[in-house]
Amino acid sequence: MTINSARLQQHFEQMSEIGKLGETGTCRPTMTPVEKKAFELAATWMLDANMTIRIDSFGNLIGRLYGTDPSLPVLMMGSHLDSQPYGGRFDGVAGVLCAIEAVNTLVENGIKPARTIEIVSFADEEGWRFNKGLFGSRGILGRLEDGELQRTDKDGITREQALIDFGCDPTKFKESEYPAGSIFCFLELHIEQGPILDLARKPIGVVSGISGPLWLTVKMKGMAGHTGSVPMHLRKDALVGAAEVIVAVNEIANQVRGAETVGTVGTINVFPASRNIIPEEVTFTVDLRDIDHSRRNRYEAQLRARINDIAKKHGLTYEITEDTNSEPRYCAGWIKEIIHQQCARLLLDAPELMSGPFHDALALSYACDYGMIFVRCKDGISHNPLEYASYEDLALGAEVLYGTVLDILSNKN
Ligand SMILES: [Zn+2]
């Protein structure tokens, strides 16, 4: 190991004290004094690693290690230090702290790269406070949408006000944007947040891509009536139709065993929701994800056909609205190759896997090549104080990240 695993562990332990929830949890909402404290702590480590630091107008913490050739596009790494309200110690934190460890190790080994390196703790990756995430990573790329500053949190505070309270100037967004071509590539280490590596007993995984979610809202409409008097063959029961669609979503996502497709109906609303009225209208959400975009499109078509058949069978009308339709974004082949080589150097058999959750890397994928390293997390539990990754695995991840950075700096200029 070239990296300092004891120092890395100490950083995790110190960071987990900020916004600590119970014994092992974290509550560190974005753009709050708690996140500011986390930034201040991470900034001291960045300064120790010879980096300059700043907080930009989006609320991102950015550390920079100047290269000898400032004309080269930067190598960017990072993740986030904000957490879910009932979150763990490793989600996001791992990507920031392992990146700092990698730069620290570079500096300690007297390596003076030509290319400038930046480490970013992105603002509001999690998205729960204002109901929309990846704020900082979309922000620096000029990809914010209309009305985002007017979104409010549960206390009625707008994003704009939260930014100002955090010390940012929302009128200066332009100054914090990165022009096209100014980022050479982006690397993000993250805990897997799923069970695949843990089940396979592998500490490290190489991410193949981030699957894009398709989010639909389906509304099925029938006819209300007295549950005691309307004979079964005359009913138009919207909930019976919806129930069949829910089963269909599950079947469609399950048709190829072991494939990466996942399909979920996570919410359902029944109208008028009375025990003695036949359900007239049912609204539910569908979340369909796949790393294989054409397969996901095929499954979507299958689902739409099934909804049509089921509606016909029960005499229902229906309406489908599309809320989100992101395409899968694949990691760069050349970066995956380097990560594989680094894993092999450490005698790690690192499987390739896709990421179902999205990360800041998804935003960056629209600006540059990107690669991701996954670290095993126990039982796949995340967004939960029980979230756990071992310091041994995290050190391995940091070592792989360090080797990847070294390789990119030496070869790809
Ligand atoms: Zn995360």
Image: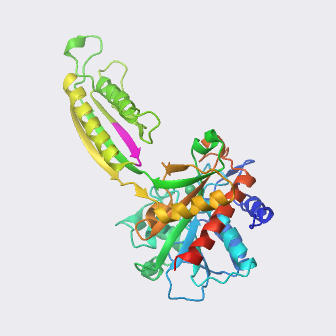
Q: Is residue 100 depicted above or below 82 in this figure?
A: below
Q: Is residue 286 magenta?
A: yes
| Residue ID at (49%, 78%) | 169
* Relative image position of residue 354 (x, y in whole percent): 49, 50
Q: Is residue 278 depicted above or below 218 in this figure?
A: above
Residue 95 seen by the camera: yes
Closer-to-camera residue (403/382): 403
Query: How many numbered marks, from 0 up?
Result: 0
| Residue ID at (30%, 38%) | 218
* Relative image position of residue 259 (x, y in whole percent): 44, 39
Q: Is residue 377 magenta?
A: no
Predominant SS of the magenta segment: strand
| Residue ID at (71%, 79%) | 107
Q: What stretch is highlighted in magenta?
A: 284-291
Ligand 1 placement by image quarter? bottom right
Q: In which quarter of the image is residue 256?
A: top left
* Relative image position of residue 232 (x, y in whole percent): 25, 12
Q: In which quarter of the image is residue 190?
A: bottom right
Q: Is residue 8 depicted above or below 176 in this figure?
A: above
* Relative image position of residue 250 (x, y in whole percent): 40, 31
Closer-to-camera residue (147/84): 84
Closer-to-camera residue (74/91): 74
Closer-to-camera residue (161/117): 117
Single out the residue that lies furthest toward the right. Answer: 6
Residue 33 seen by the camera: no
Q: Quadrant of the N terminus?
A: bottom right
